Amino acid sequence: MRITFGPWGETLAEVAEAGRAAEDAGAEVAWLPELHRSATVSAAALAQSTSTIGVGTAVALAFTRSAMTTALEALDLDEISGGRLVLGLGTGVQRLNEDWHHVDWGKPATHLRETVRNIRAFWAGCTTGEPIDLDGERAPMRIRGYQRPYAVTRTDIPIYLAAMGPVMTRLAGEIGQGWISHELTSPAFLRERILPELTAGLERGGRERADLDVVTSTCVSVDADPALARRRSAGMVGFYASVRTYADFFAFHDLADEQAGVVESFRSGRTAAGLAEAVPDRMVTALTASGTRDDVAESISAYDGLADTVKLTPPTHGLAPAEIRAAQKELIAVIQELKK
């Protein structure tokens, strides 16, 4: 499996520093999320501070920028990085789109399909001056009188799609160069729920399994004290458990009652640290790689033969910066050991 990494930092300078450390340790891609920072701006900071590691967005929100803006930002990032960009896109959930960004949610799978089509069409034709005229139910694109006067590093920047539900997962298999999970995807869920849908999507797109990079994301917490390692990951589990959209995911792992307890805590107004208190060790053990270095290495090895790539991220939710920093340092040491 390819080993990749999701860096954290209090500042963009620290994000870049963590990315360089991961690059030195042998990680193949550094992935930048979009929640508390812009994924594309973070990717630019990282690209300018590294030289060989891939620079990925995991994930940039697909509907909160126009397809043309996303395409332009990707071209600029690919130029800055010298052709190292992986454009990871995700829809986000309905509430985020409608309430936070004032974006209409209807038919997200159709919207994402058309968005990816538009981005690729723009990359292919933006320097020629030829019109782009694409019909669409959710995202038509009509561009005339436009010609990009700058060189394009690549017109085939890889696009990975984040998905967990069956419809979006099939779409990733059909049109994406990669699929990306959220941080709690277990080997069992990957094997039983995700891979069959990806296979169906590949078949629908007339593609081979080798055409798709399956990227599973894992929250990693390493400590000589396994109990402390698990407690560090509890906030991350609580964050996802507070989202009702993931009810089926938690039910699959026989954790429906535990998720209900977290949702109740969230409704009562608890912070991320408070949600961690509502997460039992059983949830953490089932959904994260938390424990000693040997424990973590064993958890990661369970994805071998299922995933092509693992994306390892430190726990962040509900933790003080010093604690995240320590967890990240241990994680980078694990990456170095795995790459030996």
Image: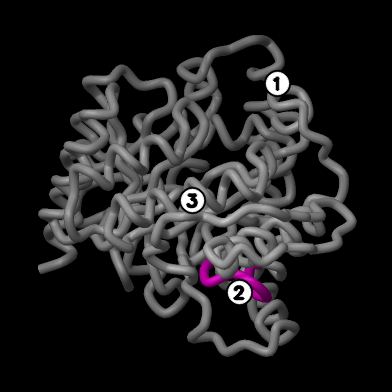
Q: Amino acid at mark 1?
A: Glu
Residue at the spot of label 1: 264
3 or 1: tag closer to the N-terminus? 1
Foreground of the two, 293 or 144: 144
Specify the quadrant of the image occupied by residue 2. bottom left
Residue at the spot of label 3: 286
Seen at 52% across and 77% down, the residue is 212
Seen at 22% across and 20% down, the residue is 322
Foreground of the two, 254 or 100: 100
250 relative to 163, above or below: above
Q: What is the secondary structure assignment of the residue under circle 2?
A: helix
Q: Mark yes or no: residue 129 visible.
A: yes
Read off the magenta span. 172-178
Residue 154: give x, y in percent of width and height: 41, 68
Residue 60: give x, y in percent of width and height: 54, 44
Q: Amino acid at mark 2?
A: Leu
326 relative to 131, above or below: above
Residue 56: give x, y in percent of width and height: 40, 53
Give the label, 3 or 2, closer to the camera: 2
